[in-house]
Image: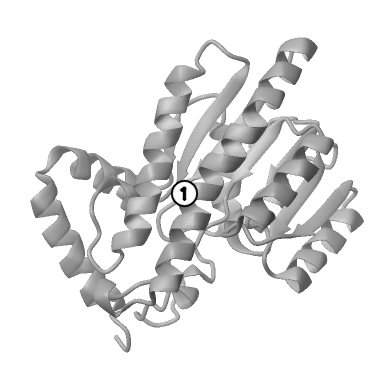
Amino acid sequence: MAARVFASALVTGASSGIGAALARALPATTRLLVTGRDRDRLAALAAGLDAAGHEVEALAADLATDAGRAAVITRAEARAIDLLVNNAGFGRFGPYLESDPRVEREMVEVNVTAVAALTRALLPGMIARARGGGTRAGLIVVASTVAFAPAPFFATYAATKAFDLHFSEALAVELADEPIDVLALCPGATRTEFQRRAGMGGGARPRGHTAEEVAARALAALGKKPVLVVGARNRLAAFAARLLPRAAMARLSGRVLWRRYRPGG
């Protein structure tokens, strides 16, 4: 599947996983600004992209902070991006009242506040440049299949991803007459480090699609649909979540998540 051609792109959360795969999937003609918290991994990604022919700038930044968000916005504007990939995000699995309040707040800052702040700051310039150049800009927001229903033991994470999904769907309608394509990407289980970092049990067996498969499908879907749920089983679950009573979905998802991913399970 051929990727859309953009002149300049910002990919957040590019240190690993889907973010890194999206950066690598873009054509070498796309100038890249990649950001993340892990300075060493980001440098390694940038070195690989440079070797593959990309013009790339790596910016270590913490999107949980105002200063980190401001630094990314400033560099993205200077590079006149026409593709914004809001991929940065993280989750924590477990009972809400046993979670670290600081981590819960950072999750909201990265998964929600950073998405809203970067999008609001960067879209006006992206749209103006697309109008002036007769091209189309792009916005990808990485949500999740858990965005479609409440998720006990993933309460904050699922709520933040519901924001990302609804935010993107609303923008797709608002901006329908503008030269920009909006996509909410809902990948479901993906073979990344997310499960380990989120404190989820369930063993180390690979699950779901690879990050590379998700990235390729996302870039192919941009401009064709407002929401991409990756995988037939995930699409069925998302469809069911929008039809069944929310209380029933919450109870069902809680049982499934705890049985599959409880710590030590």
The one of 227 and 87 positioned closer to us in this rendering: 87
In-image side of 232 versus 241 (left or right):
right
At which x and y percent is residue 238? 28, 44
> Where does the image place residue 61, in percent across and percent down from the top left?
70, 60
Which residue is depicted at the point 52% across and 56% down?
A: 110
Q: Is residue 261 above or below residue 171?
A: below
User: What is the count of numbered marks?
Assistant: 1
Q: Quadrant of residue 49?
A: bottom right
In front here: 79 or 32? 79
Residue at 81% from the left image edge and 68% from the top image edge: 44
Residue assigned mark 1: 112
| Quarter of the rendering containing residue 117 | top right
Looking at the rendered structure, the kind of residue marked 1 is Val
Q: Which residue does the image show at 39% across and 52% down from the upper left?
A: 160
Residue drawn at (71%, 43%), measured in percent from left and top? 73
Q: Is residue 234 left or right of residue 137?
A: left
